[in-house]
Amino acid sequence: HFNREAGEKNSKLQLKKQLRKCIAGVSKLRNLKKLILSKNEIVDFPREIQRLVWLEKLELNQNQIRVIPEGIFSHLPRLKHLRLNNNRLGALPRDLAACRGSLQYLNISNNLFRTFPQPVLQLANLQELHVQNNALRQLPKELFQGQSLKMFRANGNPLREPPSEVCAGGIQQILNYFNQLQHGSGQEDKRVKTMFLGASLAGKSTICKSLKQRQSKLVPKEERTVGIEISEFRIDDFTFLFWDFAGQLEYYMTHHVFITPQALVILVINLHR
Ligand SMILES: Nc1nc2c(ncn2[C@@H]2O[C@H](COP(=O)(O)OP(=O)(O)OP(=O)(O)O)[C@@H](O)[C@H]2O)c(=O)[nH]1
Ligand SMILES: [Mg+2]
């Protein structure tokens, strides 16, 4: 039970592991600057919080919140510190952007985010961001292009873009990665290793040659491939590095050394057989 008098005296309210689901009346504490509601069993985001316009610090971590409705953060323009970690969130409301001038710390780790929440990109003064242990595959490069972010944690996500290995290196590594993609040394980034694999006499060299000459070009039976024949093939500014493997058994021994994961593989099969 909250009463108004109490609210005018106190600027901080901490209720950990004490309340179950309901904090009705908290908005009477008009002058509240810090509200800590960690480790409760809150399921529905307490809408009353929108009335606490002086709030600077809000902690709702370790609850069971799935959704934050629109229209809360637009009333909290002084919010500096927001902990939402260890909930069931998959998105953030658009009006979080209203905290763009104030919010410095945001923790949304240990939630269910599959895509990066776009409203975070609006937070121009964000210094510390925690997104660990979600289901993020991609991070937007805009996040790292601003000047404010000093500390970023993203471990425990199935990241591919940038790869987890890059993210582990920190903000500077991530920036370098994006910059390299953007200004990549032209040629180098547009080379595709292309491997022609298949049984002996399957028609590998025939397909390889036909692609290069842009017309069907049967390789005579006597012209068996020896080892690996490497050639180039250009389409616009892409260069395909063709690796035409010999199909004869005696060459199989060394092939695995050249078969690399980052490549386009064309498996040739003789359908006639
Ligand atoms: N009719 C027909 N013959 C083909 C075709 N593709 C390949 N051949 C013939 O099949 C034989 C083998 O073709 P290659 O392209 O040399 O096959 P490969 O797999 O490179 O052979 P190795 O390098 O020796 O393993 C040649 O006599 C080709 O002319 C096709 O699509 N149709
Ligand atoms: Mg061949």
Image (cartoon, rainbow, N blue to C red):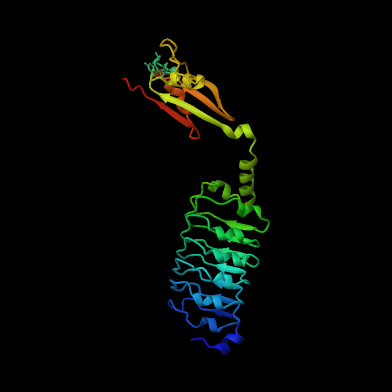
**Residue nearest the observer in this picture, 95 or 25:** 95
**Residue nearest the observer in this picture, 22 or 251:** 22
Whole-percent x, y for residue 164 in the image:
53, 48
Residue drawn at (61%, 71%), measured in percent from left and top?
Answer: 79
Residue drawn at (59%, 72%), measured in percent from left and top?
Answer: 76
Q: Quadrant of the C terminus?
A: top left
Quarter holding ligand 1: top left
Residue drawn at (61%, 73%), measured in percent from left and top?
Answer: 56
**Residue placed farthest to the right in the image?**
147
Whole-percent x, y for residue 97 in the image:
59, 64
Count of labels shown?
A: 0
Q: Is residue 21 above or below residue 223?
A: below
**Residue placed farthest to the bottom in the image?**
5
Q: Is residue 142 above or below residue 259?
A: below
Whole-percent x, y for residue 192 in the image:
53, 31
**Residue placed farthest to the front in the image?**
215
**Residue nearest the observer in this picture, 136 or 115:** 115
**Residue placed farthest to the left in the image?**
273
Is 150 displayed left or right of 18 in the figure?
right
Task: Find residue 59 and report its image quarter.
Answer: bottom right
Task: Find residue 123 and report its image quarter.
Answer: bottom right
Residue drawn at (54%, 26%), measured in percent from left and top?
Answer: 241
Whole-percent x, y for residue 175 in the image:
63, 48
**Residue nearest the observer in this picture, 118 or 273:** 118
Q: Is residue 4 above or below residue 64?
A: below
